[in-house]
Image: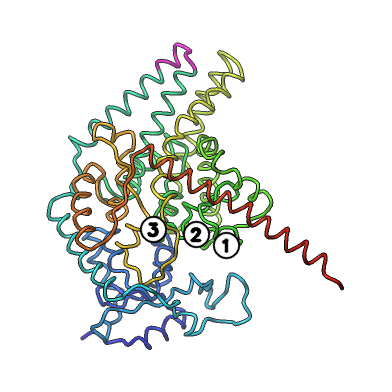
């Protein structure tokens, strides 16, 4: 018989440094080796220490993987009542590593106490949120029973592959005829489309096999696009789990270029990047005009993806634990990146230099990279205009995703331009769902939201752009107000008698 564990037992274990999460009333203890080896990254687990993560585990893992979860169970909850969540230590700055606790701000106390695990008072009803989670489980079963996890290779991906091949062929032909900018534009479209495919593979939404999807994703992401699929998975999983949280979600942490909330004015600590996000003079200047720079910066956003990808791989090379978690996958990524710069750098760009000029080569780079800009606009539309409030660990997975994510309305015949990501709400709830089945699933989600009194947000493409630019403009305006207050306070301080 399983040991019955009380709340005090679980608090005691967490304070000892154990990584405890709740799944279907089972108390799971995550060993350090799995924390290091988890394909979704260690943060995907650390953000749920002391919390019931049943919805998240089932949304992100296949039934085959779920059968292995039980081996980490050390008991079941003693109380039949809904689990009242604790505050994961990492969210308040604590991390247990190398046999001891450390604090990101080097606090005076040497370890967290029970008080540090108590979340701030919540306005949300634990009973209502638990009911949301219970009904969400039924919705997930409906979607599974409807066969929506079955990948439509013939009707879904066959047309996609035809499009990829057509764009690559046309780009190659244009290049051979020295239609440089036409070739660059078509290559940019090829990158734009194939990254949607890499996204699906990163979620194990194609073959549903981690190894198979990772190999294909490395070919698409690393070799064809020059980007690290390992970085993307590590980054994107956290984005899905702590969506739109200023301190935790890397997909909204874009200082010094963008701030979608005044919260970023306070020098936030990023748990993803393990550093302060300084709101310095550069940030003040750029954020104050961010609504004017939005499309310009996103047009060149692919360059930042290179930077993040290569920084991730460099850190992985230095970190034996991270590399050991997927040694073969790491080296496959390195080979993929080398292959990309061989065909694109020493092949395409050198050909431009030899047959034309360095200006042509620079133009080829700019046109091909700017053409992928709409992809980044697409991603911004899904979240930049939505709530960034932290409602605490009481909020259910389904309620949090509906609150922080929006769809972009578009007809079916244009859905390929969005790569399925216009149905972002349903994708966030069921990230492993093949994208060609998202439309059918979204109808079920809308019905669910209506029945539960939750909001399912969606905007047209033009309206969505206006919403995002409006948010950026509002935050930019507040930078000026903050500056005025600081200057006024300084003036008053300077005029006081000493």
| Label 2 sits on residue | 246
Give left or right: position of 422 versus 249. Answer: left
Local packing at callout 3 (Cα closer than 10 Å; few below 14, some 14-19, many 20+) is many
Looking at the rendering, which quadrant does residue 172 occupy? top left
Local packing at callout 2 (Cα closer than 10 Å; few below 14, some 14-19, many 20+) is many
- The one nearer the camera, 249 or 261, is 261
Number of callouts: 3
Magenta-colored span: 173-180
| Label 1 sits on residue | 268
Q: Earlier in the sequence, mark 3 or mark 1?
A: 3
Looking at the rendering, which quadrant does residue 42 occupy? bottom left
Name which residue lies at 87% across and 73% down: 498
Q: Earlier in the sequence, mark 3 or mark 2?
A: 3
Magenta run includes residue 174: yes
Give left or right: position of 199 versus 469. Answer: left
Q: CA distance from mark 2 to mark 1?
A: 8 Å
| Label 3 sits on residue | 40
């Amino acid at each position: 018989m399983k040991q019955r564990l009380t709340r005090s037992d679980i608090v005691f274990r967490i304070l000892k440094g154990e990584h405890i999460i709740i799944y279907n009333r089972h108390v799971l203890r995550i060993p350090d080796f799995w924390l290091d080896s988890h394909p979704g990254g260690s943060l995907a687990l650390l953000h749920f220490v002391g919390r019931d993560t049943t919805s998240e585990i089932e949304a992100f893992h296949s039934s085959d993987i779920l059968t292995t979860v039980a081996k980490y169970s050390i008991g079941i909850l003693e109380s039949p009542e809904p689990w009242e969540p604790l505050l994961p230590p990492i969210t308040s700055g604590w991390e247990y590593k190398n046999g001891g606790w450390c604090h990101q701000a080097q606090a005076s106390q040497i370890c967290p106490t029970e008080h540090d695990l108590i979340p701030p008072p919540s306005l949300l009803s634990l009973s209502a949120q638990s009911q949301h989670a219970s009904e969400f489980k039924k919705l997930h079963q409906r979607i599974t029973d409807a066969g929506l996890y079955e990948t439509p290779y013939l009707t879904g991906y066959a047309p996609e592959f035809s499009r990829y091949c057509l764009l690559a062929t046309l780009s190659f032909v244009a290049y051979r005829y020295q239609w440089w900018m036409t070739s660059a534009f078509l290559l940019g479209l090829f990158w734009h489309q194939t990254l949607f495919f890499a996204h699906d593979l990163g979620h194990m939404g194609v073959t549903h096999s981690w190894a198979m999807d990772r190999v294909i994703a490395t070919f698409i992401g690393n070799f064809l696009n020059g980007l690290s699929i390992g970085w993307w998975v590590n980054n994107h999983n956290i984005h899905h789990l702590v969506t739109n949280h200023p301190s935790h979600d890397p997909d909204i942490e874009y200082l010094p270029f963008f701030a979608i909330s005044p919260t970023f004015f306070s020098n936030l600590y990023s748990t993803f990047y393990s550093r302060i996000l300084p709101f310095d003079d550069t940030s003040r200047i750029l954020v104050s005009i961010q609504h004017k720079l939005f499309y310009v910066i996103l047009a060149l956003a692919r360059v930042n993806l290179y930077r993040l990808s290569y920084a991730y791989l460099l850190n992985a090379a230095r970190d034996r634990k991270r590399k050991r978690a997927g040694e073969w996958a790491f080296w496959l990524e390195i080979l993929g990146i080398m292959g990309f710069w061989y065909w694109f750098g020493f092949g395409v760009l050198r050909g431009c230099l030899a047959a034309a000029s360095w200006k042509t080569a620079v133009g080829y780079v700019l046109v091909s990279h700017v053409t992928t800009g709409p992809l980044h606009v697409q991603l911004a539309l899904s979240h930049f205009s939505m709530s960034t409030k932290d409602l605490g660990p009481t909020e259910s997975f389904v309620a949090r995703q509906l609150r922080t994510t929006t769809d972009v309305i578009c007809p079916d015949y244009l859905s390929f331009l969005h790569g399925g990501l216009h149905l972002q709400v349903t994708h966030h709830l069921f990230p492993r769902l093949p994208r060609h089945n998202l439309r059918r699933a979204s109808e079920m989600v809308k019905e669910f939201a209506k029945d539960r009194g939750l909001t399912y947000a969606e905007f047209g493409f033009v309206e969505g752009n206006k919403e995002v630019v409006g948010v950026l403009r509002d935050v930019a305006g507040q930078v000026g107000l903050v500056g005025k207050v600081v200057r006024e306070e300084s003036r008053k301080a300077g005029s006081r008698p000493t």
